[in-house]
């Protein structure tokens, strides 16, 4: 089992910034990628950003240039710096980890953290 603990969500005004963090612990083995997804009310969960163990990154077009993902492989943490936030960024943000432990592939999700962008 891998536990993912998220922090950093909250309420922010349009144009503001927030930083989300996620720490992985447990039977981690080798993490291949960590990322952030989000789900707004009535919508499907969507990819926000992902970073691989080799530091390759991928962003949703809607956040490119505003959000930045980073990781600390030694600490098994991933962070998402969100700038120039818009009301449409309001959603529950979920941390995701994919990897391998004892030759078995895994994928785990955090419990989610609410981000609300509103004046």
Image (cartoon, helix red, strand yellow):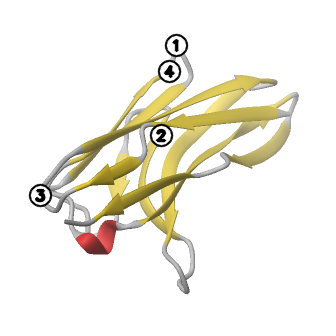
Above or below, comparing residue 45 to residue 12 in the picture: below
100 or 10, which is in the foreground?
10
Rounded to the nearest whole Å, what is the CA distance between mark 3 and mark 4?
30 Å
- Residue topped by disc 2: 52
Residue 54, quarter of picture: top left
Please rate how many residues cluster around mark 2, counting C-alpha atoms within 10 Å: few if below 14, some from 14 to 19, many from 20: some
Residue 114 place in picture, x, y as percent: 49, 55
Q: Nearer the viewer, mark 3 or mark 4?
A: 3
Rounded to the nearest whole Å, what is the CA distance between mark 1 and mark 2?
13 Å
The reply to whether discs 4 and 1 touch (Cβ–Cβ < 8 Å) is yes
Please rate how many residues cluster around mark 3, counting C-alpha atoms within 10 Å: few if below 14, some from 14 to 19, many from 20: some
Rounded to the nearest whole Å, what is the CA distance between mark 1 and mark 3?
32 Å
- Residue topped by disc 4: 73
Q: Residue at the far front: name it.
A: 119
Residue 116 place in picture, x, y as percent: 36, 61
11 or 50, which is in the foreground?
11
Rounded to the nearest whole Å, what is the CA distance between mark 2 and mark 3?
28 Å
- Residue topped by disc 1: 74
Upstream in sequence: badge 1 or badge 3: 3
Upstream in sequence: badge 2 or badge 4: 2
Rounded to the nearest whole Å, what is the CA distance between mark 2 and mark 4?
10 Å
In the picture, measured across the screen, residue 31 lies left or right of residue 63, that is right
Residue 33, quarter of picture: top right
- Residue topped by disc 3: 15
């Amino acid at each position: 089992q891998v536990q993912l603990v998220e922090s950093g969500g909250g309420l922010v005004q349009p144009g503001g910034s927030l930083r989300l963090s996620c720490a992985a612990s447990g039977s981690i083995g080798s993490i291949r990628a960590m990322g952030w997804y989000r789900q707004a009310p009535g919508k499907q969960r969507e990819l926000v950003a992902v970073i691989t163990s080799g530091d390759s990154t991928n962003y949703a077009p809607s956040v490119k240039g505003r959000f930045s993902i980073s990781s600390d492989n030694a600490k098994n943490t991933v962070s998402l710096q969100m700038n120039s936030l818009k009301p449409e960024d309001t959603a529950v943000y979920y941390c995701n980890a994919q990897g391998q432990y004892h030759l078995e592939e895994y994928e785990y999700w955090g419990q989610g953290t609410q981000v609300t962008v509103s004046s």
